Amino acid sequence: MKDIALPTTLSSIAEVPYPADLPIREAPSLTFTEQISSKQSKSYPAKRLLDIVVASVLLAILSPLFLLIALAITIESRGSVFYIAKRMGSHYRIFDFYKFRTMQTGADGYRSHLANYNQYDTIGSSFHSPGTPFFFKVKNDPRVTRLGKFLRKTSLDELPQLINVIIGDMSLVGNRPLPLDEAATLVTEPYADRFLAPAGVTGLWQVARNKNNMSVAQRVELDLQYVRKCSLSFDLFILLKTLPAMLQHE
């Protein structure tokens, strides 16, 4: 796992020297970043315990399903059972992200050929100008295999991310870890604040009713909402809404 330097907007604030007799009440209030960090540090032990317990139990229960899916992928097409790619999560930390492979081998090499079919270009305003967020998704992506379509529709392709949770790269609930090129468009305020939250398997965007018809701006706003509201009780609320969201068809 590799760390990279944070952008200026997320850099630690230098301490300001105060006279010894300065009243405490006159000290400046905490910055937004410091407030979030303080809030997260208090809830982290309980959140991490929840992650480890739930992810471990699910991995144990679902291990036969893992084997079945792996066998089906191997029979359908050549290539690795898992799709492993670099993703950027909390505080711009880069890690190996695991999913079951749902595309043909080498599919990432064809991404540039599908640029004109990016679903987000048809929702809301265009975000290709410098300094604005960019997400990439193709509806009815021709690179996806037949089994892959089923795995994606049922969200079963996401199960290997439980491994990321056990390792500590991700949490059960948080903001979606992003491909590096997409993350690179979110390094200025206020977008960069979405990386203050942990990378999550599920989150506010995943449980939204109109998630497949959201603009880039709407997705980022949900990420920022999670940063502002993040708490253990809020995580439990999102977890309870995740299963119905998985079964939701649009």
Image (cartoon, rainbow, N blue to C red):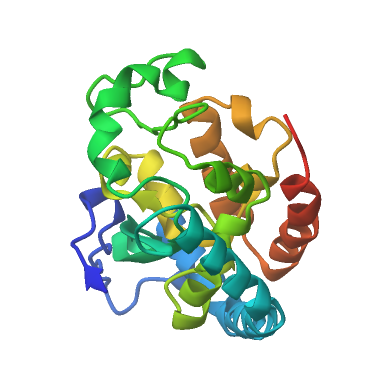
- Could you tell me residue 92's position as x and y percent? 31, 59
x then y, percent, for residue 86: 29, 59
The vertical placement of 104 against 237, above or below, is: above
Left-right relation of 39 to 119: right
Can residue 26 be seen in the rendering of this structure? Answer: no
Residue beneath the point at 61% across and 30% down? 212
Return the residue nearer the eye: 214 or 80. Answer: 80
Quadrant of the image for the N terminus?
A: bottom left
Residue 126 relative to residue 225: left or right: left
**Residue at 28% from the left image edge and 37% from the top image edge:** 185
Q: How many dots with numbers?
A: 0
Residue 103 seen = yes
Q: Residue at x 43, y 30 (%)?
A: 142
Residue at left offset 33%, top offset 17%: 116
Q: Quadrant of residue 182?
A: top left
Which of the image's four quarters has the C terminus?
top right
Position of 222 relative to 81 (above/below) = above
Q: Is residue 12 left or right of residue 154?
A: left
Left/right placement of residue 150 relative to residue 15 reads right
Taking depth in this image into account, of 220 and 141 the one nearest to the observer is 141
Q: Position of residue 60 (x, y in %)?
A: 66, 85
Outermost residue toward the left? 5
| Residue 225: x %, y % from top left | 59, 45
